[in-house]
Amino acid sequence: MKHLPWVIVMLLTLSQVACISDQEYSGEEVEALMQAELQRRLTNFRAVRSQRCYDEMLKEAIRQADSIMVVRAREAVPNPGRPGRPERPQQRQAKDSLPVKPLFERDSLLPDSTAVAADSTGRQ
């Protein structure tokens, strides 16, 4: 870090020496060089601009062609419409063909009327 100012001074000195040339140009030569550089830049600008316009035109043409192809493809395939409802499945038949009947002949939670009468008479 101590040498940073000296390095900067040396770089500035070298850059000034590099810019000084022994060759002197006349006014006509300077004008001719400026015109040549201007023509080179204009030619380059026109080429870049032309290429950019061509690329944009090509992208737009591709986009329009794709749009036309999509429209034609949609027109070629008819709209199938809404699918119909599926049929109801058939009800399955029970594997056991016996009729359903109660498990017990009488309700097991209610007391038997004959048993109550026997208790009151003393018999079982």
Image (cartoon, rainbow, N blue to C red):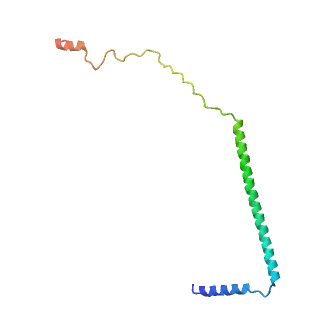
Identified at 78% across, 74% down, the residue is 37
Q: Is residue 18 above or below residue 48?
A: below
Q: In the drawing, does residue 48 fall left or right of residue 111?
A: right
Identified at 73% across, 84% down, the residue is 19
Q: In the drawing, does residue 64 fall left or right of residue 116?
A: right
Indicate the position of residue 95 as horizontal and vertical percent values.
Answer: 49, 19
Q: Is residue 88 above or below residue 72?
A: above
Q: Is residue 13 above or below residue 51?
A: below
Identified at 59% across, 28% down, the residue is 84
Quadrant where the C terminus sits is: top left
Identified at 34% across, 17% down, the residue is 104
Indicate the position of residue 39 as horizontal and vertical percent values.
Answer: 80, 71
Quadrant where the N terminus sits is: bottom right
Q: Nearer the viewer, residue 34 or 13?
A: 34
Q: Nearer the viewer, residue 19 or 57?
A: 57
Indicate the position of residue 64 as horizontal and vertical percent values.
Answer: 72, 48
Picture quadrant where residue 53 is located: bottom right
Q: Nearer the viewer, residue 50 or 91?
A: 50
Work out whether residue 90 can be spotted. Answer: yes
Q: In the drawing, does residue 119 fall left or right of residue 5?
A: left
